[in-house]
Amino acid sequence: MEPRSGCPINAAIEVLGDRWSLLVLRDVIFGDRRYFRALLTGSAEGIASNILADRLVRLVEAGILTRGTAARGQRARYSLTEAGIQTLPIIYALGNWGLDWRPGGDELRGRQQRMRDGGPAFVEELMDELRVRHLGATPGPHDGPGPFDRLDATGTPPGR
C-alpha cells in the first residue's frame, strides 16, 4: 500500500490513524489477544466484526501484524512484527497524553500510570518481552516478575 504522499507522518497515519487500528494493537499488545474471536469479544469499546476483520487485513498488509496459516477448522493466530512492536512507544505517548488531558476511571488508567512511572526503560523492557512472545526471541535475564506481570499487578484488567 503506497502512501498518498512522501510525508512520513502521512504514511504512518494512513496505517495507524483510525481509532480501531490502535485499539486492536492495544489488545494484541496488552491483552495478548491473538485470535479474531478474542479480539472481537475482548474489546471494551465493542468493535464490530466487519470492522475488526478489515483492520486485521490492513494491519497485516501494512506489515504491522502477521497472520498465521490455519488449517481448515483452525483459528489463525495474529502476531506482531518488529514494526508492530515499534508501535508501543506511540501507544505509550498517546496514553500519557490521555492521562494528562482526558477523563477516565482510575482502574483503567492504572496500567498507563505504571508505564509512565517506569519510563522509557520500562517501555523497552515491554518491547523485548513482545519480541519473545511474537517473534520467538530468546528471553533476556531478569530478576522477579516480567514487565507484563508488573503491569497486571496494577489491578488493571488485561487489554484495557
Image (spheres, rainbow, N blue to C red):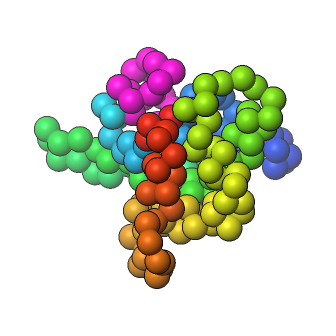
* Left or right of 24 on screen, residue 5: right
Percent across and percent down for residue 93 are: 74, 46
Percent across and percent down for residue 149 are: 44, 57
Task: Identify the image quadrant of residue 136.
Answer: bottom left
The residue under the point 59% across, 40% down is 110
Q: Is residue 17 shown above or below 81?
A: above
Image: magenta residue range: 39-59
In-front residue for pair 136/154 = 154
Instruction: Residue at the far bottom: name it.
Output: 141
The residue under the point 48% across, 78% down is 142
Q: Is residue 152 visible?
A: yes
Percent across and percent down for residue 23 are: 56, 33
The residue under the point 43% across, 66% down is 145
In-front residue for pair 127/113 = 113
* Left or right of 27 on screen, residue 33: left
- Picture quarter with the N terminus: top right
* Left or right of 144 on screen, residue 103: right
- Disc tally is 0
Secondary structure, magenta segment, majority class: helix
